[in-house]
Amino acid sequence: MGFTNSAFTAASTLVAGGILAAFMQPALATDNAFELTVKDHQFSPAPLIIPADTKVKITLKNLDQSTAEFISDDFKGGKLATGGKTVSFFIGPLKAGTYEFHDEYHEAASKTQLIVQ
């Protein structure tokens, strides 16, 4: 006994739907992705605003030639980005509030805020 045309069509639709859903999943995850740049030892956007109680992906693009380090004394998380490179990392979930972060190598010039709401 073989597949009928309608059974074959239904099975194909289920398989295609499952494949499509698998490819769509990463696109949904980008809702919690944020881009941050550092240039002249200053972060942009400043402040950075992210959602509360959510793990977020930060993509840090270092437009300077020197190494920068995203770091905070207020929450765990941080990452080194050598000159001209882009790195990604995760922070959170964090409770609503305002947190300070900076470039460890140029703290006075780079200090800014992470607003979690």
Image: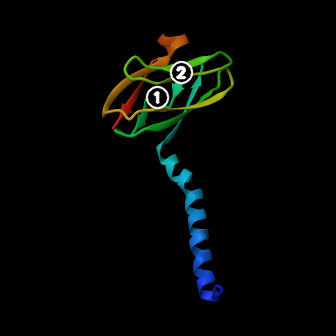
Residue receiving disc 2: 42
Residue 97 percent location from the top left of the image: 31, 30
Residue receiving disc 1: 46
Image-based side of 1 in relation to 98, left or right: right
Q: Above or below — where is 12 with respect to 104?
A: below
Q: Residue at x 41, y 37 (%)?
A: 50
Verify CB contact (< 8 Å) between mark 2 and mark 1: yes
Image quadrant in which you'd find residue 24:
bottom right
Image-based side of 18 in relation to 100, left or right: right
Q: Above or below — where is 112 with respect to 5?
A: above
Residue 25 percent location from the top left of the image: 53, 54
Q: CA distance from mark 2 to mark 1?
A: 8 Å
Three-letter amino acid code of the residue under disc 1 = Ala
Q: Residue at x 63, y 16 (%)?
A: 67
Image quadrant in which you'd find residue 16:
bottom right
Image quadrant in which you'd find residue 39:
top right
Q: Quadrant of the N terminus?
A: bottom right
Image-based side of 83 in relation to 91, left or right: right
Q: Can residue 115 be spotted in the picture? A: yes
Q: Residue at x 47, y 43 (%)?
A: 32
Q: Nearer the viewer, residue 93 or 2?
A: 2
